[in-house]
């Protein structure tokens, strides 16, 4: 019997590993629902401490399998020492696992609630914990359960209550089916209906057009340079990189909008003004607009920003990245650690963050673009300031940091959810994949190959109007979840006080 706890921890760890298969690039979304059944059953019938251990094992398996690519980013391309890379990766896995330990503890702690309240408490507590890890200590909302349902009927809830709402209805359906298995009579019928209702409602919601076409389609070209991360900043690669991108303009003279990826030009803007002047002449001659990623220096403060610049031959517009990557673009460490990093020839300088609210980029035809750089698009609520004025979403990224891993596909899945939540077409331009055009329903219209040069065009439909999620954000689902948790806490306390 002494070995049994270890076997159970191993089983939950294995469940975490398998749960990754429900996310991109695998996309086996039924796995998430099926795994929730034994997980919820185990948490409900365990002691709080034991449930916390199982939850920790689940989270560790999920994030070890789902974010192993951090090792590639930190060690292979970031050139950090092997031990440091492993420690940073494992530290993130352990921190994320603690959130799932909290979920297990809560479900076991409130097992005395009535079965209907428990069925509601499970998704409510799951969502509140997902939301918490999405912003606490800068947040890491990767592997949010709702993303796994981007191709299931439950995805239709995203325009109403966002990705956290999709997580809620998925866990609700699983908890209700579990409750039906241990109930009888009318309660069983009610629980079965509650298990089926989200899927039926999702099919109905899929028929709703939340936004409308806002004008003629914009012929847009994505240019993916295909330059590998280990060569991008080499001196001998600089000239060829500039030629790759500039020649793409001549090759697509009919494009109204051309988008290059994050830091497509590996330099600071004031160092390549003559090249940018040439680009301005090129786009002016073709009556088009070019968006390109580059580092930008503010002369007054000497701050450096990760920026996207838009040029049309008449004016320049700039968007500066707001949500920076910890230990990638800034280092939240004491000065003595920063000095050690400098002595070890490790990156130690901080990129500066742009303002929380910035003007939208405007095209000559009146369309307005909401830009997100790299994993900023994982923070959906932070992008809502741009609505309803935005007609097209743009995400530029450099997923070359993650090599041939599952990370670029996960990132595309996140971008699809952002488009679906707000009912806007999205254009995703990356350095070496996965670049794609995404429709307002979250479906991929065109997708390019990875690790090679790509120039891909599509007529992107601008859209106007607001989905319920774009109007209210995460607040409705969070308030519902909080109310349920407070009710469950009150009921559990009342039952505990009874003789």
Image (tube, rainbow, N blue to C red):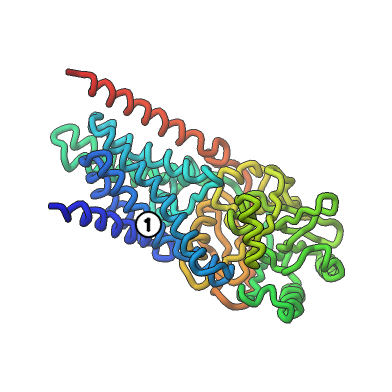
Residue 88, percent from left and from top: 49, 59
> Which residue is painted at 33% across and 53% down in the image?
58
Using a 10 Å C-alpha cutoff, classify the residue at mark 1 as few (fewer than 14 neighbours), some (14 to 19) or many (20 or more).
many
* Labels in figure, total: 1
Q: Would you name the residue on which mark 1 appears?
A: 62
Measured as percent of width and height from the top left, residue 304 is found at 75, 56
Res. 251 visible in picture: no
Of the pair 481 and 218, the residue shown nearer to us: 481
Identified at 56% across, 46% down, the residue is 138
Residue 398 position in % (x across, y down): 61, 65
Left of 452 or right of it: where is 245?
A: right
| Tag 1 secondary structure | helix
Q: Position of residue 118 (x, y in %)?
A: 28, 34
Left or right of residue 88, residue 287 in this image: right
Question: As drawn, is 160 to the left or to the right of 290?
Answer: left
> Which residue shows up at 71% across the image and 52% down it?
352
Task: Tell me if residue 498 comes above or below residue 262 in the rendering.
Answer: above
Q: Nearer the viewer, residue 325 or 170?
A: 325
Q: Is residue 413 above or below residue 240?
A: above
């Amino acid at each position: 019997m002494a070995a049994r706890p270890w076997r159970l921890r191993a089983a939950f760890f294995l469940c975490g590993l398998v749960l990754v298969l429900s996310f991109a690039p695998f996309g086996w979304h039924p796995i998430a629902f099926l795994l929730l059944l034994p997980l919820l059953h185990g948490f409900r019938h365990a002691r709080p401490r034991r449930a916390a251990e199982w939850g920790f094992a689940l989270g560790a398996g999920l994030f070890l399998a789902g974010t192993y690519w951090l090792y590639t980013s930190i060690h292979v391309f970031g050139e950090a020492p092997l031990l440091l890379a492993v420690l940073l990766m494992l530290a993130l896995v352990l921190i994320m696992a603690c959130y799932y330990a909290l979920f297990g503890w809560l479900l076991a702690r409130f097992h005395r609630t009535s079965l209907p309240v428990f069925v509601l408490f499970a998704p409510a507590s799951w969502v509140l914990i997902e939301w918490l890890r999405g912003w606490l200590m800068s947040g890491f909302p990767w592997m949010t359960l709702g993303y796994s349902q981007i191709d299931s009927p439950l995805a239709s809830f995203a325009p109403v209550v966002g990705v956290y709402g999709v997580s809620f209805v998925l866990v609700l359906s699983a908890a209700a089916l579990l409750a039906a298995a241990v109930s009888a009579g009318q309660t069983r019928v009610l629980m079965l209906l509650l298990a089926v209702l989200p899927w039926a409602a999702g099919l109905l919601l899929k028929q709703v057009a939340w936004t409308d076409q806002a004008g003629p389609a914009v012929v847009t070209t994505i240019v993916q340079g295909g330059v590998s991360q280990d060569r991008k900043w080499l001196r001998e690669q600089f000239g060829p990189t500039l030629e790759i991108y500039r020649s793409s303009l001549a090759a697509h003279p009919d494009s109204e909008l051309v988008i290059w990826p994050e830091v497509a030009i590996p330099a600071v803007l004031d160092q390549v003004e003559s090249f940018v002047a040439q680009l301005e002449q090129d786009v002016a001659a073709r009556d088009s607009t070019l968006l390109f990623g580059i580092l930008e220096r503010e002369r007054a403060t000497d701050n450096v920003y990760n920026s996207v610049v838009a040029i049309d031959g008449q004016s320049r517009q700039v968007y500066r990245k707001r949500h920076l990557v910890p230990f990638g673009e800034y280092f939240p460490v004491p000065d003595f650690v920063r000095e050690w990093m400098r002595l070890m020839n490790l990156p130690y300088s901080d990129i500066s963050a742009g303002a929380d609210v910035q003007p939208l980029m405007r095209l000559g035809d009146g369309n307005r673009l909401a830009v997100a750089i790299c994993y900023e698009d994982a923070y959906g609520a932070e992008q809502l300031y741009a609505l309803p004025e935005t007609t097209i979403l743009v995400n530029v990224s450099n997923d070359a940091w993650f090599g041939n891993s599952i990370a670029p596909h996960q990132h595309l899945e996140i971008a699809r959810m952002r488009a679906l939540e707000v009912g806007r077409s999205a254009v995703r331009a990356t350095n070496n994949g996965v670049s794609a055009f995404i429709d307002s329903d979250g479906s991929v219209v065109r997708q390019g190959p990875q690790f090679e040069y790509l120039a891909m065009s599509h007529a992107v439909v601008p859209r106007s109007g607001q989905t319920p999620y774009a109007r209210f954000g995460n607040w409705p689902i969070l308030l519902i979840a909080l109310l349920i948790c407070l009710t469950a806490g009150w009921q559990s306390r009342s039952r505990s006080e009874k003789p």
